[in-house]
Amino acid sequence: MQPPLVEVVVELQFDAVQLSNEKLQYFYHLNSDSLPESEGTPEDSPISISAESVKLASRRGVSFPALRSTWTPLLDSFLAIFSIHQLKQLSLSYQNEIPIEDLRSFRNYLNINFEMPETLKERVEFFRSEFTYKYPFGEIKVWLQPDWDEEMENYCVQLNLEARHIGNVATPDLYPAIQQLHEGIKDVFRQILSQDYIRSLPQ
């Protein structure tokens, strides 16, 4: 069975900086092996830059630890070139799609129950649900909702998890902080999904 991970996103927010063309061009030149060298960022680029944030995204189906060696040079050079020493907010998001036979079978994959009146339960197959887990570093937002996967031509459950670090992060503490967010997401993933499903995934 393929891992359900579809997309991973890391976003760093900071006080606004001046995005001069000279510095942007230097950044792209420095990372020309990983990024297209241009003043803008094409939609298919793994990085998105604004005056107050930088965002990295991957659809390789692997989590942050496997992406760290590729993403570290990009983030380190960006923070150095634009003299960013402190982050206002840090987040790590994982988007998952879990194939299911039909909408009612989603309960076989989850450890959590949705209580509702019997009359409503008979009419509702699945509904969007949002909840938040609290952690010492901040919080993890969870979204569960049904969807139709056109590529696989069957139903799936979208499980999106976004871990947010509450409070400032000094740039030397960036990677331990992202790893902490990753560990929190992994913990929530194992709490939400059934052990039978987790055991079926590649370890």
Image (tube, grey):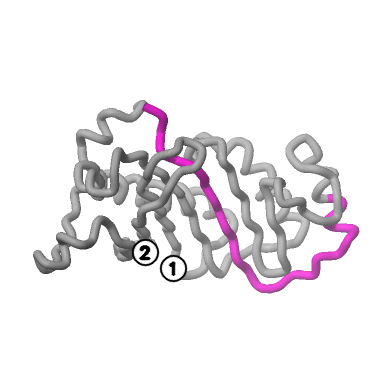
Residue furthest toward the bottom? Answer: 16
Q: Amino acid at mark 2?
A: Glu
Residue 177 falls left or right of residue 112: right
Is the residue under label 2 in contact with that under label 1 (CB below 8 Å)?
yes
SS at mark 2 in the image? strand
| In the rendered image, the vertical position of residue 73 relative to residue 162, given as above or below | above
Q: Which residue bears the numbered disc 2?
A: 139
Write the residue at 66% across / 50% down.
75
Nearer the N terminus, badge 1 or badge 2?
2
Residue furthest toward the right? Answer: 22
| In the rendered image, the vertical position of residue 1 relative to residue 168, given as above or below | above
Residue 151 falls left or right of residue 118: right
Other residues around mark 2 within 10 Å, as few (<14) / some (14–19) / many (≥20): some
| Callout count | 2
SS at mark 1 in the image? loop
Q: Amino acid at mark 1?
A: Ile
| Residue 24 located within the stretch drawn in magenta | yes
Q: Residues under labels 1 and 2: Cα distance?
A: 8 Å
| Mark in front: 1 vs 2 | 2
| In the rendered image, the vertical position of residue 101 relative to residue 45, given as above or below | above
Q: Which residue bears the numbered disc 1?
A: 166
Quadrant where the N terminus sits is top left
Taking depth in this image into account, of 32 and 199 the one nearest to the observer is 199
| Residue 155 located within the stretch drawn in magenta | no
Write the residue at 14% across / 64% down.
115
Write the residue at 59% across / 60% down.
12
Which residues fall within the magenta stretch? 1-26
Taking depth in this image into account, of 45 and 64 the one nearest to the observer is 45
Residue 120 falls left or right of residue 162: left
User: Percent position (x, y) of residue 109?
Assistant: 24, 42
Quadrant where the C terminus sits is top left
